[in-house]
Every structure is written in C-alpha cells, then in structure tokens.
Image (tube, rainbow, N blue to C red):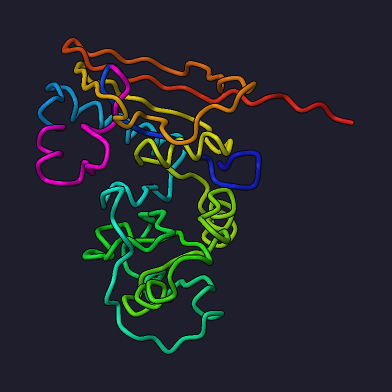
Amino acid sequence: MASAEGRPRVVVSVTASVDGRVALRRGEPLMGEAASRTWRGMMPASADGVEEGRTAELAERWSPQAVLEGSGSFVADSADPVEHLGEYDESIEELQGDFLPVEVGRRPGREKWFTVVDGRGRIAWDVKSQGEYDVLVLVSRATPAAHLAYLRRERIAYLVAGEDKVDLDAALRKMYDVLEVTCVVSTAGGGLNGELLRAGLVDEIHLVISPAIIGGLGTPTAFDGPELPAGQAPTPVRLLSTHIEKDGLIWLGYEVVRKETSGA
C-alpha cells in the first residue's frame, strides 16, 4: 500500500543512542570497520532479535521493495566526487536520462532495490547486487556526466530527479511510477532523514533506542539536516507500538500525523 500522495510510503527505520545519536561522531560513516565495531559493542544482547522483529513487522505490514541510504553512509562528508572514471561517448542528453538495464530487472532472485542518494557522484561501487537487492542510484541533472557514464558502463541502474540536487519527492514518485515501488524503508543517517522530514515525505518511524549515551556537539541525530523554520510547528506523530527489553533496549513505532485537508 502506498501513501495517499502517489508516491511510496516512506518508513524511517533507525537505531539510536538514548540521546538520539545515530553515529559516533560527525563525518565518520558507521559502515567503516572501526566505527561499526564500536557501534555494535554498545548494543545489548537483545539487539539482533529486536532488529529481526522490526524487519519482519515491516515486511508483514508494507512489503517494502526498497531500502534507502544516503552517500554519507559510505563516504565521509568531505569526500569529493569519484575521479579518473575515463572517457565517455554518450551525449549529455542521453546520460541525463534514466538508466534501467534490462538484465538487472530480469536477474533471477531480484526483488528489491538498495537505493542510494548520490547526486554528487561520490561512491565507487564494489558490489552492485547482493541476494534479492540490486543497487539503484538517485542522481540529478547536476551529477557529473563522467559519473553517469561510469554507472552505465558498470550496468548500475539510476534515476534522474532534480536539477542542482536530487529532488527526493520527484525521485520517490519515479520509483512509484516506473518501478512500482509502494514502500521504501529509509535506514539512512540523520542528514537524509532530515531532508525527508522537511519535505513532508516521512510517513512512519520505527526507532530502536540503545541504552548508551554518545553526546558530542554536532554528532548526527536521527533527523539531522535543515533546522525547523521559524514559525513552523514540529511534526506531530502518533504512537503505534512500544517494545521494551529487560536489558534496556526500546523499540518505538510512530505514525506521522497528517493535517486534514478540507474539501471544497
């Protein structure tokens, strides 16, 4: 079931510390070996079981066909676009069109998309598919042409949405219209989740809280990104579920409360 707005339902599924941090420090992706090891070390024994339960519940309720990540999950904030990608023969007009290789869509066992917002072309992909997932990159018309040509040579699917940066609303609508994706689960960091929040694109939140405190001025939170504009009220949510483990792990489910629109 999609949202009522002609786009996929967006569920934010994150794990945070008691103080809402989703990373150990700014600029250090959790997918790095050292950071990942420290992060796992702060998780109590129940964490794996709760994570499995969260994944199973979302699968049962919404059957998501895509997960969503930002480039900041893979590279540092200061990382530049990938260089030395070689020459290309395609025209700019061709490169700025969506690229969906037929062999990817027909790959045996392929059911879902591992979707990454990478408008600046900062990720050099080592893995293009794994199990039921295939990589799908969300780019804009400002993404370097050499990077788009690289994605084509590597047979990595991408959708173009936005001019100067990736337009998340347009990208999600393309995923809905072109790929028939009805639910996306964002496991991204605070920057991308914050952008989704400010754009009014978050429908549901599943937050697992680990009994640990990280602290640190500027350490990313579950919804980082743009500040709340002056005069704008915080986004209201409705509690859906609570789950508390004896070792202190808490899993909370919320639904974003939409403002009712009156008819004519």
> Viewed as shown, does residue 126 lie left or right of 207?
left
**Quadrant (top left/top right/bottom left/bottom right) for the N terminus:** top right
Asked whether 8 or 49 is in front, the reply is 8
Q: Quadrant of residue 103?
A: bottom left
Asked whether 144 or 239 is in front, the reply is 144
Q: Where is residue 12 in the image (x, y as percent from the top left)?
A: 42, 34
Q: Where is residue 11 in the image (x, y as percent from the top left)?
A: 45, 36
**Quadrant (top left/top right/bottom left/bottom right) for the C terminus:** top right
Span of residues in magenta:
19-39
Give the farthest residue toward the bottom: 89
Q: Position of residue 39 (x, y in %)?
A: 16, 32
Q: In which quarter of the image is residue 84?
A: bottom left
> Viewed as shown, does residue 137 lie left or right of 231?
left
Give the farthest residue toward the right: 264
SS majority, magenta: loop
77 relative to 207, above or below: below
Residue in the picture at 51% in, 60% down = 179
Residue in the picture at 39% in, 76% down = 146
Asked whether 214 or 216 is in front, the reply is 216
194 relative to 107, above or below: above
8 relative to 178, above or below: above
> Viewed as shown, does residue 188 lie left or right of 138?
left
Magenta stretch containing residue 82, yes or no?
no
Residue in the picture at 46% in, 71% down = 100
Magenta stretch containing residue 37, yes or no?
yes
> Viewed as shown, does residue 48 lie left or right of 57?
left
Number of labelled discs?
A: 0
Q: Where is residue 24 in the image (x, y as percent from the top left)?
A: 21, 32
